[in-house]
Image (cartoon, helix red, strand yellow):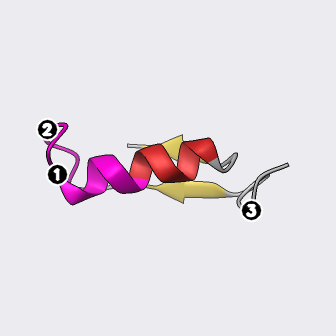
Amino acid sequence: MGFLAGKRILITGLISNRSIAYGIAQACKREGAELAF
């Protein structure tokens, strides 16, 4: 289980794979969060 397992996170500002939000989304997903964009 990751640090964010079972958490739901809303990610805004996801425009390209070079944005900060993209990196945050990758890290949150890796830690087990459920993401909404």
Question: 15 and 23: which one is in front?
Answer: 23
Of the numbered discs in the image, which one, if any, rests on residue 8? none
Amino acid type, label 3: Phe
Task: Give the side of residue 4 with respect to residue 22, left or right.
Answer: right
Residue range highlighted in magenta: 13-24
**Dot 2 corresponds to which residue?**
16
**Dot 1 corresponds to which residue?**
19
Separation of marks 3 and 1 at Cα, in angstroms: 23 Å
Pointer 3 or 1: first along the chain: 3
Task: Name the residue at 14% across, 42% down.
Answer: 15
Task: Name the residue at 23% across, 46% down.
Answer: 14
Pointer 2 or 3: first along the chain: 3
Amino acid type, label 1: Ser
- Kindly indicate whether the residue at mark 1 contacts the one at mark 3 (C-beta within 8 angstroms): no
Q: Residues within 10 Å of mark 3 (few under 14, many from 20)?
A: few
**Dot 3 corresponds to which residue?**
3
